[in-house]
Structure formats: C-alpha cells, structure tokens
Amino acid sequence: MTEITIEIPDKLNKIVPVLKKPFLLRTIRNLAKTKIEEDKQQLKEAEKYIRDFETRYNKTFDEFKEKFSNEADVQAHEDFVEWSFWIDVQNKLKEEINEFKKLNGG
C-alpha cells in the first residue's frame, strides 16, 4: 500500500481531525468516480475516430496494419499514425478506467 502525506497550511490546522481515514477514502472514491466519467467521455471521442477509420478503410486497425505497405501513399501513412494514436489513447483510457474502478470496489 502506498502512503500519502498531506501538507496543510497552519491556518487550516483545525480541520486535521476531520481528515480521518473514512473521510479520505470517501473523497478518493468520489474523485475516482469523477475521473472515470471524464475518461469515459474521452473514450467515446477516441472510439469515434477509430470507427471513422474503420469505415474509411472497411477494416480494423489490426487488419490495416497487417497489410500496410511502405509503398502506401502519404495519406495512408498519415492515417496509420493517427489511427495508431487513437488506438493507444483507447487502450490507455480503458486501463485507467479499470484501475479507478478498483478504487470504487468495481
């Protein structure tokens, strides 16, 4: 388990007793819930771009990558880079969502 140290300005020293473990856990869970919702919105955007490429090329990224040639035109190269970017974004967001769900007992 990771330990977190919180520095509180002297003026706020009176609230230290309130910052008990249950309160902090609730706060972290609420932050995790908010982050999950933000990530889900970003995931929708990434998936929209991925669907657009799948429609344009009538194949998945893996199929596109498998048949990709160095002799492809400039647009195909640019699309490969951008499509790859959105796949990476999608994977990272899904992983992050899963990690934050663990904080919420999911």
Image: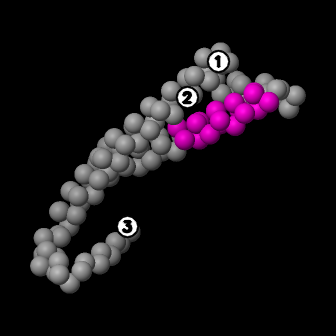
Secondary structure of the residue carrying numbered label 2: helix
Where is residue 106? Give x, y as percent: 31, 43
The residue beneath circle 1 is 56
Residue of label 2? 49
Q: Is residue 103 above or below residue 81?
A: below
Viewer-nearest residue: 21 or 17 = 17
The label on residue 1 is 3
In whole angstroms, how far apart are the C-alphas of marks 1 and 3? 46 Å
Which of the two residues, 75 or 93, is positioned nearer the viewer here?
A: 75
Residue 4, image x, y percentages: 34, 72
Task: Reply above or below: 47 against 30.
Answer: above
For the point 30% across and 75% down, the residue is 6
The answer for how far apart the CA atoms under marks 1 and 2 are is 11 Å
Asked which secondary structure carries label 1, the reply is: helix
Mark 1 neighbour density, 10 Å: few (under 14) some (14–19) many (20 or more): few
Query: Image height check: is 16 above or below 78?
Result: below
| SS state under label 3 | loop
**Quadrant holding the N terminus:** bottom left
* Type of amino acid at the residue the image marks with label 2: Tyr
Mark 1 / mark 2, whichever is N-terminal: 2
Q: Amino acid at mark 3?
A: Met
In three-dimensional space, the C-alpha distance between marks 2 and 3, rounded to whole angstroms, equals 38 Å
Is residue 35 in the magenta section? no
Q: State the extent of the magenta-drawn residues as a range.
A: 74-90
Q: Is residue 85 on the magenta stretch? A: yes
Residue at 46 percent across and 36 percent down: it is 43
* Tag 1: amino acid: Arg
Label annotation for residue 98 = none
Q: Is 79 placed left or right of 39 in the picture?
A: right
Q: How is the image coloured?
A: one colour
Residue 66 visible in the current orientation: no
Instruction: Report whether 32 appears left or right of 79.
Output: left
